[in-house]
Image (tube, rainbow, N blue to C red):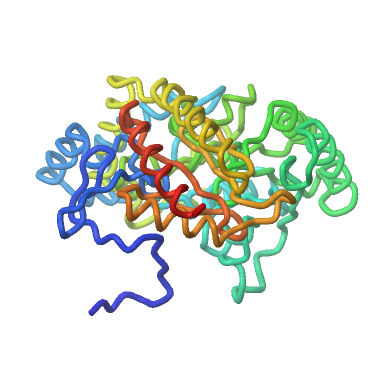
Amino acid sequence: MSHLSPLLKQASKVCVERGEGSWVFDVDGKRYLDFTSGIGVTSTGHCHPKVVAAAREQVGKIVHAQYTTVAHKPMLDLSDRLSERMPGAIDSVAFTNSGSEAVEAALRLARHATGRANIIVFDGGFHGRTMAAASLTTSGTKVRTGFHPMMAGVVVAPFPHGYRHGWTEEQATDFALQELDHIMKTQSAPSDTAAMIIEPVQGEFGYYPANKAFMQGLAERCKKHGILFICDEIQAGYGRTGKFWSHEHFDVQPDVVITAKGLASGFPLSAIAASEELMNKGMPGSQGGTYGANAVACAAALATLEVFDDEQLVANAEKQGARLLSQLSELQQGYRFIDTIRGKGLMLGMEIGDDHRTPRADIAAKLSAAAEAHGLLLLRCGTDGQIVRWLPPLTVSASEIDDAVSRFAKALQEVAE
């Protein structure tokens, strides 16, 4: 008998005992290809030997070196290594535990640094479950319902969801930017707006990538009005889209980068990064926390970066992502309910719907269950749960891509019968 809260909802019926690379093994010994990666967390696969070795070594030295009390070398080294990966003038890092906590830290910094209150977010964004982060989230009502009133000062602007509106990308982009300008005239004056925060590739809403014209339009408006441009790279960053940061696809340079998930290969760690000049505009003591920058998590994150370099994981994400997209697109031709496939790299979403873009969550649920029966773990997302998402580890091989698609093809055949 389990005493877990009944409010926790799990996507599969699997009880895992161990994991290795792209595979997990349940308590009965059955193995599954894990194309969920713990919602994009296990970037180097399960239990990568280098990450395991680094964590084990650190556990024998010190586990909890509370970072507002003492410094420790893994944290200092990691801040240096992360700064090397950051765009533009970003050279200062603050660590937290979760994506939500990093989002809240970025929000706090933006309001301190600008002296302004309002935050512009974009329709469909997911930024977390805590109060401020949930107030910024519009990917669905599940993190907001029954939780009101939400935090004040949040204004929602359109994202270029061409598919949802039945528009071309250009039409969706023009509309979104025009509406953003209208919002800054009617709801949040630039002089009241501290920041714009965006997922360059939206996650929970349905794996919608932004585009260059839209992202550059945001960056130009932020620069013109002294508004901070914040990229939430929690899910799409850290190599998943075939670039180290997903905003690199769009030739923009944010003022603040938020990262988590793939940062430490499964250990709880997140961070915000900005220029030292911008960080200095925050209030002293406004960053910190009991478990932030845990020494073992930082050691694992350092090993993660080593694996990224040694095994060229960003390039592998681009290569294997193209392979996966090609094979899924071939499958799409035989099934009318696969309406479209979106995303970049190893972050792909398969929209299940009818000819009029009506979500078919019932079919998506059957597909996920059938895939699980064939030893393939997949997640769903979207407003109705109608999107089957593909998130293998960045270490995934070509043969594992082929294997996963073969298993999914069997699931498709069963569901379509």
At a point 14% along the width and 46% down the height, the residue shown is 59
Q: Is residue 332 left or right of residue 67?
A: right
Q: Is residue 316 above or below residue 66?
A: above
Q: Most extreme residue toward the left, as rendered? A: 60
Which image quadrant is residue 311 in? Answer: top left
Give x and y (percent) for residue 58. 16, 41
Which image quadrant is residue 74 in? Answer: top left
Q: Say which of 19 and 261 sits in front.
A: 19
Q: Is residue 376 above or below residue 48?
A: below
The answer to whether one can see residue 92 in this image is no
Give x and y (percent) for residue 36. 39, 47
At a point 72% along the width and 39% down the height, the residue shown is 227
Q: Say which of 289 and 88 sits in front.
A: 88
At a point 33% along the width and 55% down the height, the residue shown is 373
Q: Say which of 396 and 29 sits in front.
A: 29
At a point 21% along the width and 56% down the height, the residue shown is 26
Give x and y (percent) for residue 256. 57, 36
Which quadrant would the N terminus be assigned to in this image? bottom left
Q: Is residue 367 left or right of residue 357?
A: left
Give x and y (percent) for residue 25. 20, 51
State the count of labels: 0
The answer to whether one can see residue 242 in this image is yes
Q: Most extreme residue toward the front, as rendered? A: 417
